[in-house]
Image (cartoon, rainbow, N blue to C red):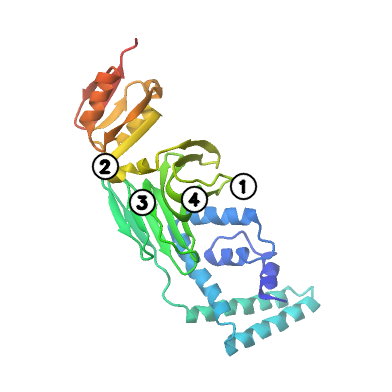
Amino acid sequence: MTIKAMIGLFRKWSRPPRSAEDWIIRLHAPDCDAGDKQSFERWLAENPDHDVAFQRANKAWQMTRAFAADPVLHRMAHEARKEAQAAAEKKNSLSHQLRSVALVASLVVVALLYSLKPFAPDHYETGHGELRTITLADGSIVHLNTETRLTVVLNHDERRLTLNAGEAFFEVAHDASRPFLVNTGHEIVRAIGTKFSVHIDHDTTVVAVAEGRVGIRSMTTEAPLPDLFPGQQVRISAQGKLVSLRSEEADTVAAWRYGRIYFFNETLSNVLADVNRYATPKFEMVDPRQGEMRISGTFKTGDVAAVLFTLQDGMGFSAAQTDQVILLKKSKP
């Protein structure tokens, strides 16, 4: 019996995965299915520490394979096979079966002794109105928009980033052996040699591509989502449904990097929400229903005066301003 088969045997008595070690067993089980993988991605998204723990456990598992030729490990594997065969002959003896699984687990323990320092996560954050550019160890460049939180874990197998809040633009260094993944908690965006942005906008994820191509997979549904190419932007709900797919000039993707924000036939409420990410004081609508009006244009980030002029002179709003808030009201025609 192979190690993978014994893991499948162990799964019959195991509780739902709760730890990184549990997930190692589940993901290597012969009957691991798409539902298991979606549950695993949800578990990763619950806490950035889960990703770190899994990388450490997965590294230990990989070490058992890398050191398969070691005489000590080889002898232990041989003993595990003997125990599994004995357990198969004694189908009513659960203790024999569990003993064989315990021997398999001992391989992981030994591999841990060989493992190097675990991959530690890097955490990055920006405040209100703050922009930041970071260069990752693999050469990729990440631009962080205002009020953004990002966790980065780079290892030998993949490059996994978790966007916890805000928006980021990624310039991905080519490395075919290590996928570049961005997890938003609801969707996973996979870069295919590309430059793209990801924005967590309330309960939706917005992805736009400036160069190359990206694939998107929902963590909440198996429904397929389209790959994106330069000049395309997609908005996806937390339930994994396609809200909108539209064209966007590639050179306007993440234009906030250059201090500009662009809008095309966007609702006023969404425009003000975006403007408020950089502005002080912030804009508020007296009547939220008036936020359904459509607007197109471009503004300099943080230029409150220009936005206010457009709203008053071009759209007929009146404004009452304090140090913290600009209240907008439009008289009925």
Which residue is at the far top?
333
Q: Is residue 188 visible?
A: no
Task: Report the front residue among 265 and 311.
Answer: 265
Which label number is shown at residue 149?
A: 3
Measured Cα–Cα span from mark 2 to mark 3 = 20 Å
* Mark 4 residue type: Val
Residue at 23% x, 24% y is: 309
Q: Residue at x 25, y 20 (%)?
A: 312
Tell me which residue sits at (66%, 65%) in the image. Answer: 29
Image location (x, y in percent) of residue 174: 43, 62
Q: Which residue is mark 4?
A: 214
Residue 259 is labelled as: 2
* Amino acid type for the residue under numbered disc 3: Arg
Mark 4 in CB contact with mark 3 (< 8 angstroms): no
| Depicted 319 relative to depicted 325: above or below | above
Label ID, residue 222 = 1
Can residue 150 be seen here? The reply is yes
Label 1: few (<14), some (14–19) or many (≥20) C-alpha neighbours in 10 Å: few
Q: Position of residue 100 (x, y in %)?
A: 68, 78
Q: CA distance from mark 4 to mark 2?
A: 25 Å
Q: Three-letter amino acid code at disc 2? A: Gly
Q: CA distance from mark 4 to mark 1?
A: 17 Å
Specify the amino acid type for callout 1.
Glu
Q: Is residue 279 left or right of residue 174?
A: left
